[in-house]
Amino acid sequence: MSIMRSLAILGALLLGASLAHAGPVEDCNQTRDLKRQLRGCTAYIKQGKAAPANLATAYLNRANVYARRGKHKLAFADYTSAIVRDARNPLIPYNRGNAYLDTRQYQLAIADYSRALKLDAKFALAYLNRGIAHEKRGNNRAAVGDYRRALAIDPKATAAKRRLKRLQSR
């Protein structure tokens, strides 16, 4: 066995060992294992020793896990806790908007995407998803405007291109 191969195997073993004993921060911030992420975020939140912005991220990550699992009541509570701790993070209202979109609460989704855009006017995905919410509500004119804004920021946004083309061909 070559020295390089031995080092690679040793490195993989050490990495595996460190992942197996990761703390709440590492567990909360990884996205491969939702159970581990949920456990890590919950443990980190329960410690209660972190800066507000860090706690907000833990609540956001946990909310996203809940939303992916269809536990929207828990997700919305955590999104709100995150916003209370870091009202300037555009990812929080954006992700809560996604949960509202998934639960067909389009007006609330639009409000949250708008909030995210006030915090970050260059947030192309927020324009795209707000456009989708407008489209679901039947406001195609507003949807077209948002798809155009998304494309102005990110000309490669294929979903915005596709949706805009479809609406303009009607």
Image (cartoon, rainbow, N blue to C red):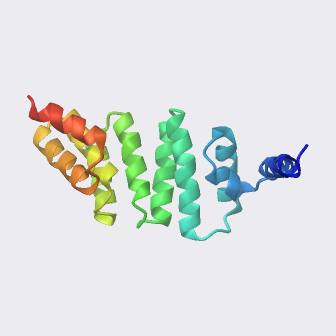
Count of labels in the image: 0
Q: Residue at x 42, y 65 (%)?
A: 87
On the question of residue 133 being in view, the answer is no
Residue sticking out furthest to the right: 1
Image quadrant in which you'd find residue 117: bottom left
For the residue pair 164 and 59, the one nearer the viewer reads as 164
Residue sticking out furthest to the top: 170
Q: Residue at x 18, y 42 (%)?
A: 143
For the residue pair 105 and 25, the one nearer the viewer reads as 25
Q: Is residue 16 left or right of residue 143?
A: right
Residue 48: x %, y % from top left:
66, 64
Residue 136: x %, y % from top left:
23, 33
Q: Residue at x 52, y 47 (%)?
A: 63
Residue 66: x %, y % from top left:
54, 40
Q: Is residue 131 left or right of residue 37?
A: left
Q: Is residue 147 left or right of residue 34?
A: left
On the question of residue 99 being in view, the answer is yes
Residue 123: x %, y % from top left:
32, 57
Q: Is residue 77 above or below residue 70?
A: below
Rendered-image quadrant of the C terminus: top left
Residue sticking out furthest to the front: 2
Image quadrant in which you'd find residue 103: top left
Q: Is residue 113 above or below residue 85?
A: above
For the residue pair 32 and 40, the one nearer the viewer reads as 32
Q: Is residue 12 left or right of residue 84?
A: right
Rendered-image quadrant of the N terminus: top right
For the residue pair 116 and 168, the one nearer the viewer reads as 168
